[in-house]
Amino acid sequence: MDDDSRHALFEYLLRLGDDRLVLGHRLSEWCGHGPILEEDIALTNIALDCIGQANNFLQLAGSVENKGRTADDLAYFREAIEFKNLMLVEQPNGDFAYTIARQFLFDVFSFHLLEELQHSSHQELAGIAAKAVKEDRYHLRHSREWVLRLGDGTDESHQRIQSAFNDLWMYTGEIFQADKVDDLLFEKGISVDLKSIESKWSENVSEALTEATLAVPDAEQYMASGSRQGIHTEYLGHMLTEMQILTRSFPEAKW
Amino acid sequence: MEDESKLRAFEARIEAGEKIEPKDWMPERYRKQLIRMISQHAHSEIVGMLPEGNWITRAPSLRRKMGLLAKVQDEAGHGLYLYCSAETLGVDRSEVVDQLLYGTAKYSSIFNYPTLTWADIGTIGWLVDGAAIVNQTMLAKCSYGPYSRANIRICKEENFHKKQGYEIVATMAKGTPEQKRMVQDAVNRWWWPSLTMFGPPDKDSPNSAELMKWQVKLQSNDELRQRFVNLTVPQASVVGVALPDPDLKYNSKTGNWDFGALNWDEFFAVIKGNGPCNRQRMRARRIAHENGKWVRDAAGAYAAKKRAA
Ligand SMILES: [Fe+2]
Ligand SMILES: [Fe+2]
């Protein structure tokens, strides 16, 4: 593999890993505080899947980079501007509706993405995706069912999840903004065509929102962008402060 | 008169080592005691998620984060499984949960102590799950079928938790000077509370005789406590951490490790709600429950609409 492709693949794997690491972290904040015991179990389970997927992607990123960095080095010793996760997944949990809306918007994207990545020409990447897509199928079913329950449940739940979607919508535009990394890897058959994922995403999201008696938010609004280049919301720095406290305080220690 | 003969038959079955199943006749006292014990056990699993959940977001490696997430998820599963066992005795989960949140139901006092460093996570796995295993291994043989089976299943997972916790302790105990200090400090703080997990001394344990007669319990609190101490002392010396008891001494006559006096005043105070984290734990549970009300209502309303459709 030439240097440009190697570098692009490293960046791409960081995106895949960081999305799941950051989302898994947010979900794990629910642990012990869920609205019902079954949801404590479900959210913790999804968090665990996300961290497991992140571990696999970051490990592969480290080996592609070939500078001896482990998944832990990448998770615990980078600054916010070096994280490449979507802004969507770093948004705070809010209420349960907010968490579900965030999860659903990501799950639809992640499921279709991983389904395609199973056929990547890069074998290790394809292998990780093939395992992860099975987990994501369940995540998507879980979040979609809750979108329906909350949207078509009570007036209160309807209003809560509608405002969650309205608030989060501005973070959905950048999901499908392809850059040089995407283009180069797509040419090599390693990554996927984000345009085709976007049309599946739009279709699935509007279909679910309609079934849930919810309005699809207005696309003509401010849309955030830049997280794949390391531009984030203010929330990420605080999350990393918490996540990295031990490893940064005792860099020599093994745990 | 009829009850008298039913009671004799019931006790004969227990004597013969048979399991009592939900549909079988049982004395009201037996049912009440089991509901109390099983729901207390379930509440302990649920409240126990809080002190450990406190460190998930700060776990120092991805592997440790996954291990802790999986453990806390298991504890939630134990809670769910035990609430189902309690329901076989004719109570509702929401009823016993309300008794925890707004009534006088108890949970294990161990979870009213704070987790201050990452070493607490290892120490809890080793000592607290370790003590739970000693207790639950006994309960796995209890006379009530559903509770016996629940404990068999739970014990398998608790063994894994203990192994994982002990490994964290062992790793830190051979780590940097700061890690060694953290792990010794955690063991100093958790050792005595973990000994109280077996309940008050036999002489102050009012329910014990009856529970043992009906084989809900098969060993006394003091017997279990001694067994735990005997198991744990050699484990501590293998990893090189000290147990904070100057009176700990091997007794060659009994083959037991003799240990110092426990602070029962503190134990009874914590049980009554006066411990370091009682208010905080119950507040967290109540907030979760009350914030979740609109979610449960929505799920109910949605299910009703689907049924009507
Ligand atoms: Fe447990
Ligand atoms: Fe456990």
Image (cartoon, rainbow, N blue to C red):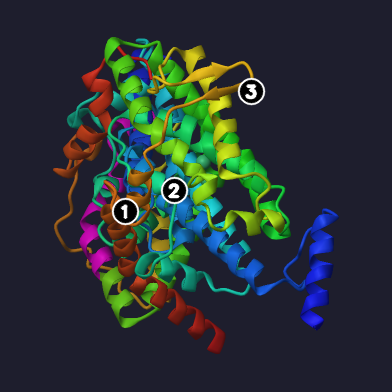
Asked whether disc 1 touches disc 2, contact meaning CB atoms under 8 Å apart, the reply is no
Q: Quadrant of the N terminus of chain A?
A: top left
Q: Which mark is residue B100?
A: none
Residue numbers of the magenta segment: A163-187
Residue drawn at (47%, 32%) of the image:
B127
| Residue furthest bottom in the image | B308
Residue B254 x/y as whole percent: 64, 23
Residues under numbered marks 3 and 2 in contact, where contact means CB atoms less than 8 Å apart? no
Residue of label 3: B254
Majority secondary structure in the magenta region: helix
Report if the beta carbon of the residue with label 1 is closer than 8 angstroms to ligand 1: no
Which image quadrant for residue A50?
A: top left
Please tell me how crowded label 1 is: few (under 14), some (14-19), or many (20+) other residues with Cα within 10 Å. Answer: many
Give me the disc on residue A44: 2
Tag 2 secondary structure: helix
Is B175 magenta? The answer is: no
Mark 2 Cα within 10 Å, few/some/many (few <14, many 20+)? many
Q: Could you tell me which residue is drawn at 52 percent across and 52 percent down?
A: B205
Q: Helix, strand or loop at disc 1?
A: helix
* Spatial CA span between label 1 and label 3: 40 Å
The mark found on residue B281 in the picture is 1
Query: Foreground residue, B212 or A65?
Result: B212
Query: Between A105 and A234, which is closer to the camera in this rendering?
Result: A234
Determine the chain carrying the residue at label 2.
A
* Gap in angstroms between the C-alphas marked 1 and 2: 19 Å
Q: Is residue B204 above or below residue A100?
A: above
Identify the residue at image location x=27%, y=49%.
Answer: A88
Asked whether the viewer can see residue A188, the reply is: no
Q: Are marks 1 and 2 on the same chain?
A: no
Q: Is mark 3 within 8 Å of ligand 2?
A: no
- Place of residue B74 in the rendered image (x, y in percent of width and height, measured from the top left): 52, 46
Label 3's element?
loop
